Amino acid sequence: MVDFNYQFNFELSDEVRYSKWLRAVALSENKSLGDLSYVFCTDDFLLEINQKYLNHDTLTDIITFDYCDDDFIHGEIYISVDRVKDNAKDFVVSFDDELLRVMSHGLLHLIGFGDKTDIEKSIMRLKEDEKIKMFHVKQ
């Protein structure tokens, strides 16, 4: 089950479509969704989580907490909508596509993809692009 939570005045336009897409992303990697929660928040909210749980004092666009077991995806994904807006401007892409990139990025981490090395980052970017295209396919 995919659950969407909002910590401020932001909401996805079509939660059902996003849920179907996220399930399709997991299935495309031979995984199944268990309990997956997305929390959309502000920079300040996510910074507090980053400081409290990860001892990082920096802004970030996403924090993922992994509770997976075997082939079932369980986790919490926190996304700063403020960072997504800024990143969209910096990378000259639409807010919607940058949001899809960050949402898929968190799920790809739960699936097992990393982004620490240059090779991992390259694979992650290719996977993100692949998953964004899946969203734009008529379902």
Image (spheres, helix red, strand yellow):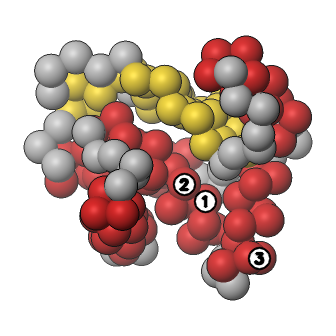
Answer whether labels 1 and 2 touch (C-beta < 8 Å): yes
Q: Position of residue 90 (x, y in %)?
A: 74, 76
Residue at left 49%, top 24%?
A: 65
Which of 92 and 40 lies nearest the eye of the viewer?
92
Q: Which residue is mark 2?
A: 102
Task: Give the class, few, some or many, for how many residues have Cα within 10 Å of label 1's Cα (few <14, many ≥20).
Answer: many
Q: Amino acid at mark 3?
A: Lys
Note whether residue 104 is visible: yes
Q: Which residue is mark 1?
A: 99
Residue at left 17%, top 37%?
A: 31
Task: Give the class, few, some or many, for how many residues have Cα within 10 Å of label 2's Cα (few <14, many ≥20).
Answer: many
Compared to 74, does 103 lie above or below? below
Compared to 91, does 68 lie above or below? above
Answer whether labels 1 and 3 touch (C-beta < 8 Å): no
Specify the farthest residue to the front: 117
Residue 80 falls in image quadrant: top right
Q: Is residue 47 left or right of residue 19?
A: right
Q: Amino acid at mark 2?
A: Val
Q: Amino acid at mark 1?
A: Leu
The alpha-carbon separation of the residues under discs 2 and 3 comes to: 14 Å
Q: Position of residue 38 (x, y in %)?
A: 57, 34
